[in-house]
Amino acid sequence: MRKSWIRSGVVALIGLTLVSTACSNGNSENASTGPNDTAESGNKVKIEYFQMKPEVVDVVDELIAKFEAENPGIIVEQNNVPNPENVWSMRVSTNDAPDVFTHYPHNAVFQKMAQEGRVVDLTNDPLMANVQPAIADLSKIGGKNYMVPIGLATLGVYYNQEIFEKHHLQPPKTYAELIEISEKLLAAGVTPMYFHDKDFNGIRQEVVYKMGQTMPNIEQFLDDVMNGKAHITDNPDFKPFAQKLLDLRKYGQQDNMGTGYDDALRDFANGKAAMWFTGIWAIKEIKASNPDLKFAMFPLPTEDPADLKTQVSVDTAIGLPVGGKNEAEARKFIEFMSSKESVEAYLKTAGYPSGIKGVESGRPEIASLTDLIASGKVYPTIERLWPPGINAEVGKATQELFLTKDIDQYLNKLDTIFYNKFNQ
């Protein structure tokens, strides 16, 4: 039942890609012309590294140069193309898989490909030896590891340190303290929080994060709903959950529904609000918008500090195709890319937390989040188990809640979105 929606998604992706995107051996400037192009490389082995993040092309080129200097018998060609997930799906499905590649363990299409036996099973493989145990567990698909997780992404609450210092405030450790801080700021004429509710995607990120963090056994419950065994309204936790979403908006700017992500980022950077919830990916842009801003992040607090944890998704992970022609050389490259030195160099620019043990990574602004990750107080994004499209529908439904403030209508809408999805 789950297989049907994933399979149809893969077919659609392949069809779209065949029409609109040439495979890496065609239009890509960085494309390999073959795994063993002896005209250029003599007896050297050439491997293709298909990686999906355009913002890291330069640092990957630097790492490749270092790897090649240490391994003169191997040439690595980096390949980064538009629509990389679609291209990867097409190439793997047509037996043209890259020698080594990045992907996302939470991606539904990747999960299907892995479970079909198209990706090398790395469970208990020496390549996984340096991975943080909690991150290895979080990355599993059907109890197995198929990727070596290098870099991680998480979310939290940005806060303006100067505003907090001026009003003698400390980052909250409980949800009650968060509300108390917001009340104090509001009374002082300061906008406590900024929301970019014009963008349903940002709302979706908040909802998914909070569901996974605060609702007990939510994955199993939603699985039951999607299998037609339960309804959203059967769960008594949903109504207070929705009420808290609404309650926090009382501490936001007046035009939260007209504020998009870019607007919120700019306004937070310019000191128009004390707090803003989003992902760590905004750090670089905030600094670019206002290099003088003093800010940091704290994890979204829970009712009980003992329950505090943060959502983590794997931002960069490296794997191998089954039947790869140059697996020995590709393994050597993964071993190099997942070494402490290489991971530190790779993550230096973005400042993301590391999936590898002992790596000094992550900017000082996110120290409280990296401490949670290092302690294993993490959980995976629950939407990794949802059929494609559901996450967008959840974001839009929650957007409607903020407009109507009708919680019962919202819960019925969520039930329509989730109920019996695995059987449709």
Image: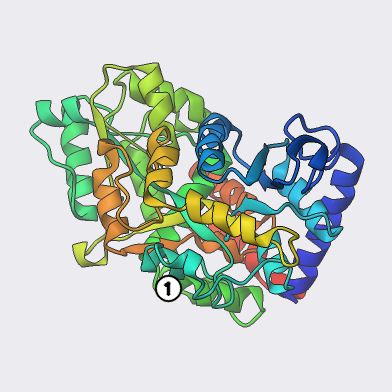
Q: Nearer the viewer, residue 224 or 54?
A: 54
Residue 180 visible to the viewer: yes
Where residue 201 appears, as percent x and y from the top left, is: 56, 42
Residue 24 visible to the viewer: no
Quadrant in the picture for the C terminus: bottom right
Where residue 403 appears, as percent x and y from the top left, is: 52, 41
Residue 186 lies left or right of residue 337; in this view the side is: left
Q: Residue furthest bottom?
A: 229
Residue that numbered label 1 is attached to: 236
Relative height, residue 319 to residue 126 (above, below): above
Where residue 171 appears, as percent x and y from the top left, is: 18, 43
Among the 4 quarters of the image, the one containing residue 356? bottom left
Where residue 10 appears, as percent x and y from the top left, is: 80, 59
Q: Nearer the viewer, residue 118 or 177?
A: 118
Q: Residue at x 44, y 75 (%)?
A: 217
Among the 4 quarters of the image, the one containing residue 131? bottom left
Residue 352 lies left or right of residue 366; in this view the side is: right
Q: Secondary structure at mark 1?
A: loop
Q: Residue furthest right?
A: 19
Counting every numbered tag in the picture gives 1
Three-letter code, disc 1: Pro
